[in-house]
Image (tube, rainbow, N blue to C red):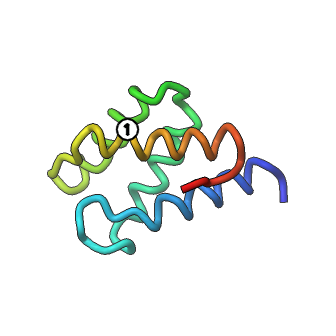
Amino acid sequence: MNSMQDTNIKLMECLLSWDPLGYGTDSYETEVVDVIEAVHRYDDRERLARRIQSIYEFSFEEIIPLPVCQKKASELLMIKNSGTCEL
């Protein structure tokens, strides 16, 4: 498996286990795909966090607090930059 596929799988696993709004971890498939796209687009934690926040807000009309999004953005950028998820 190439490193991009491996990274995407790790990003997906990290996001699919996240339940930021309490709907259950199986409620966010569409958002996971959008967030993975954003991870590849942004290298800045703040911009990525705001994008994550807007993706979930658009879908669920609820706002995830920015510090929660910043923490997840940091984790995702760590995976993207190192290829591992250290949680």
Disc 1 element? helix
What is the x, y in percent for residue 52?
36, 42
**Total number of numbered labels?**
1
Outermost residue, left side: 61
* Residue at figure coordinates x 24%, y 68% from the top left: 22
* Residue at figure coordinates x 55%, y 60% from the top left: 12
| Residue type beneath disc 1 | Gln
Outermost residue, front side: 87
Left or right: 41 in relation to 26: right
Residue 5, quarter of picture: bottom right
What is the x, y in percent for residue 63?
18, 46
What is the x, y in percent for residue 59?
25, 54
* Residue at figure coordinates x 45%, y 56% from the top left: 32
Left or right: 44 in relation to 70: right
Outermost residue, right side: 1
Q: Name the residue beneath numbered marker 1.
A: 70
Look at the image and tell me in which quarter the C terminus lies.
bottom right
What is the x, y in percent for residue 1?
84, 60
Compare residues 11 and 33 and report the one nearer the observer. 11
Q: Residues within 10 Å of mark 1 (few under 14, many from 20)?
A: some
Compare residues 8 and 74 and report the one nearer the observer. 74
